[in-house]
Image (cartoon, helix red, strand yellow):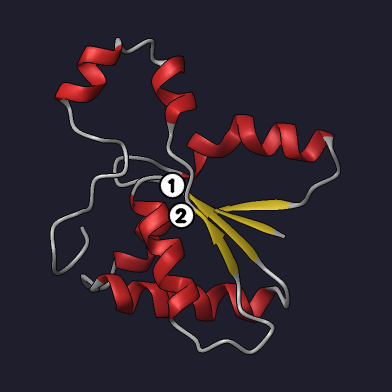
Amino acid sequence: MLWLLHGNLGSPADWKPVMDALRSNAIESRALNLWKYLECCPKSLPEMGRVLCSEIAAQDKHPHICGYSLGGRLAMHAVLAHPPSGREPRSSAPIPAWRMKRNRLPAASRMRNGPSNASPPRGRIF
């Protein structure tokens, strides 16, 4: 299964067009709501990675993880959460250019607002 992680200002609904395309090609996917994992308390990026890896591994023996923005960073931490065993998730963190095009943001505006793969502040995610 392909697990989809939204960005810092996003939600699972951001992945709907992607999930529709995947479904039409018989590819199973699931978009996680990252905010539910922070309801009790803030977590560091490595802590959040361990939580996501455990959650996904409990439901999927051979997961693939894809995220954009903060979701991409968390996908990386989820993969790093466990040493290689042959069953660890694989991750991909695409740059969300499709979203920029959809929102019709001019290139100058995108650059002024920072790169799409900018790192979140150190410490805890919010």
In the image shown, does 87 or 1 lie closer to the viewer?
Answer: 87
Asked which quadrant contains residue 89, the reply is bottom right
Q: Is residue 24 left or right of residue 15?
A: right
| Secondary structure category for the residue under label 1 | loop
- Which residue appears at 14% of the width and 69% of the height? 123
Lateral position of residue 49 relative to residue 39, left or right: right
**Percent x, y of residue 92:** 53, 54
Image position, residue 21 (x, y; %): 73, 32
Instruction: Quickly name the residue at label 1.
Output: 6
Please identify the residue farthest to the right as the structure is shown. Answer: 26
Q: How crowded is mark 2: few (under 14 residues within 10 Å), some or many (20 or more)?
A: some
Q: What residue type is labelled 2?
A: Asn
Local SS, label 2: loop
Q: Which amino acid does label 1 sit on?
A: His
The quarter holding residue 44 reads bottom left
Q: Which mark is residue 111?
A: none
| Quadrant in which the N terminus is drawn | bottom right
Q: In this view, does 34 lie above or below 88?
A: above
The residue nearer to you, when weighing 94 against 24, is 94
- The image quadrant of residue 114 is top left
The residue where tag 2 is placed is 33
For the point 76% across and 52% down, the residue is 28
Q: Residue at x 21, y 70 (%)?
A: 42
Callouts 1 and 2 close, C-beta under 8 Å: yes
Question: Closer to the observer: label 1 or label 2?
Answer: 1
Q: How busy is the neighbourhood of tag 1: few (under 14 within 10 Å), some, or many (20 plus)? A: many
